[in-house]
Image (cartoon, rainbow, N blue to C red):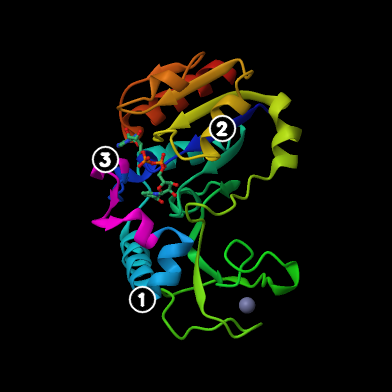
Amino acid sequence: MGKIVIFSGAGLSAESGIPTFRDAGGLWEGYRIEDVATPFGWIRNKQLVLDFYEERFLQMQKCKPNAAHLAIADLSSYFDVICITQNIDTLLEQAGVKEVWHLHGRIDYHKCEWHYSIGPIDADWQCDYRAATRSPTQIGDLCPKCNRQLRPDVVWFGEAVDMRTDRLYEIVSQVDAFIGVGTSATVYPAANLLRFFGDVKEKYFIDPNPAYDVLNGFTVIEGTAAQKVPELVAVLKAKYQ
Ligand code: NAD
Ligand code: ZN
């Protein structure tokens, strides 16, 4: 069975009703990124950050997978599909995709605020508590290990991304096709994946407004995810079955 890597960004979920933030001029639902998606924003105003993620939590709970998520799930029953996503929503999982790596965390988990990326550098002072949550995190929801405030399990600007480098090196030479979809490819280090998989023979990129300057060697398909992903999935199934 062939291996296919799908690298997605906010555009994959746009047609499910979750706006991308580049399209809103760098604001995310009216909030400034530095206020709600950086460690400094958290230190300054935890209530504001938790309000923002509560809105995202409730919004994402209402959304359903769109035709692109469902087509990716369909593809994964024919190929070994690995989804690497920058999205914090869980629409790929809801569609039935088994292997999803969330580079920037997940909205339905929370973790200790003394998580290494914000606590002191001394490892003795880090806390690794992380758990699924059924409701948005509130002020006063405390870590059962160390009693500090809990925060959403999302990766903020300036924090470390869980890249699973060992696994990436293990699979890179085995990948038959790479598909990028709905990402402005401006958030690093995630965007480095386009170059990391540069030697893969078959590379596609789907976006209504593709970042052509980083897409050398890609077959670029201009259009929305819900329109174009199902079409590409049909082509791949016909080609390799
Ligand atoms: P981005 O907002 O920087 O870029 C979105 C991209 O999607 C653009 O290239 C745009 O042209 C494209 N797009 C817009 N509508 C589309 C559609 N219908 N179909 C396909 N593509 C479409 O998003 P990014 O590159 O993912 O980086 C944003 C960061 O913001 C990520 O780190 C992510 O964690 C976070 N974010 C997540 C969500 C989510 O979880 N759904 C939503 C907004 C932002
Ligand atoms: Zn803790």
Q: Amino acid at mark 3?
A: Asp
Q: Amino acid at mark 2?
A: Asn
| Residue 27: in magenta span | yes
Q: What crowding class fits label 1: few (fewer than 14 Cα within 10 Å), some (14-19), or many (20 or more)?
A: few
Q: Is mark 1 within 8 Å of ligand 2?
A: no
Numbered-mark total: 3
Horizontal and vertical percent position of residue 107:
45, 62
Res. 168 image quadrant: top right
Q: Quadrant of the N terminus?
A: top right
Horizontal and vertical percent position of residue 115:
61, 68
Q: Is mark 3 within 8 Å of ligand 1?
A: yes
Q: What crowding class fits label 3: few (fewer than 14 Cα within 10 Å), some (14-19), or many (20 or more)?
A: few
Is residue 165 toward the left or the right of residue 161 in the image? right
Check disc 1 and report its element: helix, strand or loop. Answer: helix
Q: Which mark is residue 192?
A: 2
CA gap, disc 2 and disc 3: 21 Å
**Figure check: 39 above or below 165:** below
Q: Quadrant of ligand 2?
A: bottom right
Q: Nearer the viewer, residue 176 or 46?
A: 46
Residue shown at 31% from the left, 41% from the top:
22
Mark 3 = which residue? 23
Q: Amino acid at mark 1?
A: Gln
Mark 1 = which residue? 47
User: Which stretch is magenta?
Assistant: 22-36
Residue shown at 58% from the left, 25% from the top:
195
